């Protein structure tokens, strides 16, 4: 959207230069072409990325949690879903969610929460950083609480997987944002 609004302004400047007869036709054409190919298209691409990429990533983040909520609600109504959840519960408890791995996941989430709090206190100066870190800290804490106390749910492991997806995407956003900032400085 920014490119759409800035093009008329820059073309107006080009027309003002043309009216002053400082530059002749070829120079003006080069200026217009370079602007339209460099500035305007880049701004439009950035706007499209923000418009499509962020909602898509947010949908990806919370799709795992939404799936777990749907499975939990269907487990009391549909026998096939209940059987599937019992089978997956046994399978997950013997592979990915053993007590030792749950302890490791909890420690990693605790360290992640501490790092996010420290980043929020030290480097949280822009609005984007603050929002990302404010979402990441509670997600880590909720993940820790959920891993330790809500084991009586039928879709418990799916809730944990959904929370880990949310936290992984938040970490990816935070690393990408800080990497872009370090390149610009």
Image (spheres, grey):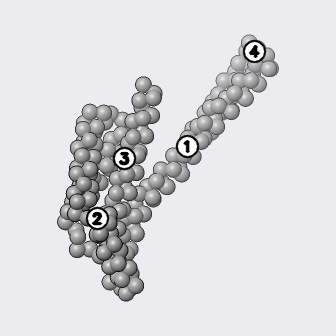
Instruction: Write down the residue under mark 1.
Output: 47
Residues under numbered marks 3 and 4 in contact, where contact means CB atoms less than 8 Å apart: no
The residue at the point 32 percent across, 66 percent down is 95
Looking at the image, tell me whether mark 1 or mark 3 is earlier in sequence order.
Answer: 1
Outermost right residue? 25
Disc 2 to disc 4, C-alpha distance: 71 Å
Tell me the crowding category of disc 2: few under 14, some 14 to 19, or many 20 or more residues within 10 angstroms, Cα based.
some
* Residue 103 visible: yes
In this rendering, would 60 be left or right of 105? Answer: right
Asked if residue 5 is positioned above or below residue 63 in the image, the reply reads: above
Q: Nearer the viewer, mark 4 or mark 1?
A: 1
Assign the N terminus to one quadrant of the image. Answer: top right
Q: Is residue 40 left or right of residue 164?
A: right
- Disc 4 is placed on an element classified as loop
Vertical placement of residue 152 versus 56, above or below: below
Asked if the residue under mark 3 is in contact with the one under mark 1, i.e. CB atoms within 8 Å, the reply is: no
Cα–Cα span, label 3 and label 4 = 51 Å
Residue 152 drawn at (x, y percent): 22, 74
Please state which of residues 21 and 130 is positioned toward the viewer in this rendering: 130
Res 7 → quadrant: top right
Quarter location, residue 84: bottom left
Q: Nearer the viewer, mark 2 or mark 4?
A: 2
Q: Tell me the residue at 35%/78% (across/down).
A: 87
Q: CA distance from mark 1 to mark 3?
A: 23 Å
Query: Which label belongs to residue 97?
Result: 2
Residue 171 numbered mark, or none:
3
> Could you tell me how far apart the alpha carbons at marks 4 and 1 are, in whole angstroms?
33 Å
Residue at image mark 4: 23
**Relative image position of residue 105 (x, y in whole percent):** 27, 55
Name above or below for residue 93 compared with residue 125. below
Task: Tell me which label, 3 or 4, sits earlier in the chain.
Answer: 4
């Amino acid at each position: 959207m920014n490119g759409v609004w800035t093009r008329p302004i820059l073309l107006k400047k080009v027309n003002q230069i043309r009216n002053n007869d400082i530059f002749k036709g070829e120079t003006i054409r080069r200026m217009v072409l370079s602007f339209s190919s460099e500035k305007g298209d880049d701004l439009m691409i950035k706007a499209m990325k923000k418009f499509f990429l962020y909602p898509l990533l947010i949908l990806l983040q919370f799709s795992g949690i939404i799936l777990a909520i749907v499975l939990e609600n269907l487990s009391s109504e549909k026998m096939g879903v209940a059987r599937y959840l019992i089978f997956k519960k046994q399978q997950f408890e013997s592979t990915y969610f053993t007590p030792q791995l749950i302890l490791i996941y909890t420690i990693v989430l605790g360290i992640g929460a501490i790092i996010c709090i420290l980043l929020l206190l030290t480097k949280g100066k822009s609005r984007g950083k603050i929002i990302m870190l404010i979402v990441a800290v509670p997600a880590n804490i909720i993940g820790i609480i959920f891993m330790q106390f809500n084991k009586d749910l039928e879709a418990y492991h799916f809730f944990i997987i959904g929370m880990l997806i949310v936290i992984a995407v938040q970490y990816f956003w935070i690393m990408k944002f800080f990497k872009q900032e370090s390149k610009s400085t």
